[in-house]
Amino acid sequence: MKMSVLEVMLSVMLQELLLPLARYRRVTPGGVRIELHYTSQSLAEKRKVQTLTLEALKKALVNYTSTIQGQQGKRLWVTRNRSKEDREKIRALVSMKDYAKRYLDDNQIDLDWRGRLWLKGQQVLFWHVWKRPEEGAVMLTNASGDETGWWIDSVQFARVLGLPEERVRQELTD
């Protein structure tokens, strides 16, 4: 197979390609993490390498679609960064899932990377656009401490986990 100059360049610059098998379960996103070896410390040169890599991947994946359950037929995408909203959504999902794992078995926890989390079959994570926060809602915050719009009903959350509501509220707001 004949390789283009770009493919040769990228094969030399590819430091690590992470494709963990666990990423293909329903509860985790399908994805690949690429770490590049840079030949220059210049930010402009690093950005150029990143852009060339993304363009090559987009071109290579243009005719591929997902085969992951629930995502079949969706076009694969390549991006450099996630949006602030995506990072906040992922933080809300992962942090609430990790909290629940302290009290529940993995088979009692399910999530959808579009922003839904179920504990024992009950949806417990909400976004203010989809559902208005109710009395007793705990608003989740980002790393800066600002509300993200993601929230849980502390009464429901505590009941599903078998914990006192005050304990859940205190632990989630500290």
Image (cartoon, rainbow, N blue to C red):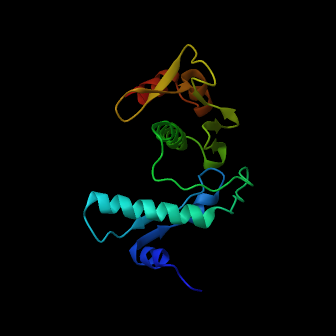
> x, y (%) of residue 37?
35, 70
Determine the residue located farthest toward the left in the rendered image.
Answer: 41
Determine the residue located farthest toward the bottom in the rendered image.
Answer: 1
> x, y (%) of residue 148?
47, 28
Q: Is residue 128 left or right of residue 71?
A: left
Q: Is residue 1 left or right of residue 91?
A: right
Q: Quadrant of the C terminus?
A: top left
Identify which residue, 171 or 54, lies in the foreground: 54
> x, y (%) of residue 133?
57, 18
Q: How many marks?
A: 0
Which residue is rendered at x = 63% and y = 59% of the image?
Answer: 24
Q: Quadrant of the N terminus?
A: bottom right
The image quarter containing residue 127 is top right
Q: Is residue 95 above or below residue 58?
A: above
> x, y (%) of residue 34?
46, 64
Which residue is rendered at x = 63% and y = 25% of the image?
Answer: 130
Identify which residue, 61 or 92, lies in the foreground: 61
Identify which residue, 24 or 13, lies in the foreground: 13
Identify which residue, 104 or 133, lies in the foreground: 133
Determine the residue located farthest toward the front in the rendered image.
Answer: 5
Which residue is rendered at x = 60% and y = 56% of the image?
Answer: 30
Q: Is residue 80 left or right of residue 123?
A: left
